[in-house]
Amino acid sequence: MLEPATLCLAPDGTPFSEAYGDVYHTRTGGLGQACHVFLGGNDLPRRWQGRDGFVILETGFGLGLNFLATWATWRADPERSQTLHFISCEKHPFLRDDLQRAHALAETGHTDPDAIQSEAAQDGTAPPESSRAETQFAQAIPNLADTLCLHWPTLTEGRHDIAFEEGRVRLTLLFGDASDTLQHLPELADAFFLDGFSPAKNPELWSAELLALVSQHAAPAASLATWSVASGVRHALADQGWQLKKTPGFRGKREMLQGRRSEPNEPSGE
C-alpha cells in the first residue's frame, strides 16, 4: 500500500522527512539546486534545443521542484524542443494539500527565484539565456506550481500521466518502489536527474541494482547529474558504462557529479 509523505519542517524552516531523517532540499533552495545541478549538469536547455522531443527520468520527485524548474526553463526557451516528457519515481508522494503548503513555503522566502537566477547567471548555469527569460522563469514558478497541484493525481500505486501545455509537456509519475515501477517503463531517457534523500539515509534508491535498472533506460548520448559524489554511487554508475566527472556543487556543497553514456542503448523514439 502506498504511504504518503508527511510534511514536516526542520528548525530552519526547510521541508523535512521524519521517515528518512533528511531534508528535501538545503536551506539555500531547491530551485537553485535544480538549476545548477540538474539542468546545468545535463547541459540544459542547450541539449533539447531544436529537437522534436526530449525525455528526462528522475529518481525522486519529492516536492516537484526539479520538474517545475525544468518546465519553466523549457517554456521560456524560444528554441525549446517540440515536446518535453518528464518521468519521475516517488515512493512516498505528498497529499495535494501538503504539496501546496510546501510550495507556499518556497514562495515566502525559503526559495527565491530572483536570487537563483542572479547566482545562476554569474556561474553560467542560468537556464534561460536572456534577462527577459530570467524574469519569466521567476514569475512562472508559482503559477506552474498551482497548475501542478490542480492536476495532482490520486495517490495510488503505478503510473500516472499528466499533460500540460496542450500536450507538449507530459509528466509521468511512477508512484511506488522504483525497483518495481521502472521494470515496466518502456521509455528511454535523454537525461537523468538522480535525486532523493542521501545514500546514507535512503540506500535503496542509490543501490547498484537500482542504478543498473535506471541505466537500462538510457537513450544514445544520454547524460546524468546528481549532487551525490559518494564512492558507492560513482562505482555503480561506472560499472554501467557512464563516463563520470566531478564538477563544482551548488553553494555550500563542494562537488557534484556529471555523467555521459559511453555505450548508449537503443534510441528513445521521442
Image (cartoon, rainbow, N blue to C red):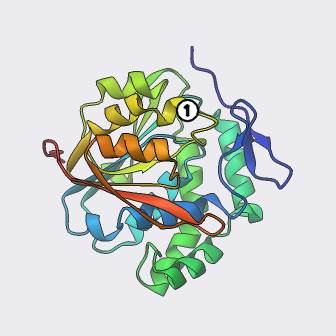
Q: From the viewer's side, name the closer residue of 263 and 155.
A: 263
| Image coordinates for residue 198, horizontal then vertical, percent | 60, 43
Q: From the viewer's side, name the closer residue of 197 and 68.
A: 197
**In this picture, is 229 found above or below 126?**
above
Where is mark 1, residue-wise?
Answer: 203
Left or right side of 17 for 83: left
The quarter of the picture where residue 2 lies is top right
Give the quadrant of the N terminus. Answer: top right
Q: Residue at x 57, y 71 (%)?
A: 138
Left or right side of 77 for 263: left
| Image coordinates for residue 260, horizontal then vertical, percent | 28, 56
Left or right side of 72 for 10: right
| Image coordinates for residue 158, horizontal then vertical, percent | 43, 23
**Res 160 visible:** no
Q: Residue at x 39, y 25 (%)?
A: 181
Q: Residue at x 57, y 39 (%)?
A: 199
Q: Residue at x 68, y 33 (%)?
A: 20
Disc 1 residue type (three-letter): Pro
SS at circle 1: helix
**In this picture, is 121 found above or below 12?**
below
